[in-house]
């Protein structure tokens, strides 16, 4: 029973992280598709133009590992408490 809970907790963690990454990519894509630059006014303020473009964000891989294990631990705890209450 313990291994079943652990496997389910890791599966839930994988699903949560896939949904998070997919939504981040989807929102970035959506914002990119809807962006309409103001080219006419940009020529008047040439000094204010950016020379670098950044899409998305980067973080330490350790953050994702800790997040993955943390979500799995919380999921396992919730499932364990639910099983205890249910009987």
Image: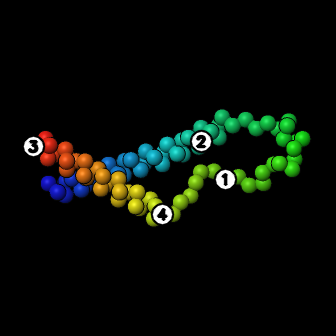
Residue indicated by mark 2: 29
Q: How crowded is mark 2: few (under 14 residues within 10 Å), some or many (20 or more)?
A: some
Q: Name the residue under label 3.
A: 87
What residue is drawn where x is 81% and y is 48%? 49
The residues tagged by marks 3 and 2 sit, at their Cα atoms, a distance apart of 46 Å
Residue under pointer 4 = 61
Q: In 3D space, how far apart are the residues under numbered discs 2 and 4 (Cα atoms)?
A: 23 Å
Residue placed at 65% from the left, 40% from the top?
Answer: 32
Q: Of 1 and 73, which appears nearest the observer?
A: 73
Q: Name the residue under label 1.
A: 54
* In this rendering, the label closer to the viewer, 2 or 4: 4
Q: Position of residue 77 (x, y in %)?
A: 24, 52
Across and down, in percent, residue 36 comes to: 73, 35
Query: Relative to 42, is 4 above or below?
Result: below
Q: In this view, does 8 lie above or below 62?
A: above
Please tell me which of labels 2 and 4 falls first in the chain.
2
Asked which secondary structure carries label 4, the reply is helix
Image check: 39 left or right of 62?
A: right
**Camera-side mark, 3 or 2:** 3
Give me the C-alpha separation between circle 2 and circle 1: 13 Å
Depth-wise, is mark 2 or mark 1 nearer the camera? 1
The spot of residue 54 in percent (x, y) is 66, 53
Q: Which residue is drawn at 48% across and 63% down?
A: 61
Question: Which quadrant, please, contains the N terminus?
Answer: bottom left
User: Is residue 41 shown left or right of residue 87?
Assistant: right
């Amino acid at each position: 029973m313990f291994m079943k809970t652990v496997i389910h907790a890791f599966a839930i963690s994988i699903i949560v992280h896939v949904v998070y990454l997919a939504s981040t990519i989807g929102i970035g894509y959506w914002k990119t598709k809807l962006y309409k630059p103001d080219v006419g006014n940009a020529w008047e303020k040439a000094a204010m133009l950016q020379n670098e473009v950044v899409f998305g964000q980067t973080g330490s891989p350790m953050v994702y590992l800790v997040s993955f294990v943390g979500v799995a631990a919380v999921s396992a705890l919730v499932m364990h408490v639910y099983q205890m209450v249910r009987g």
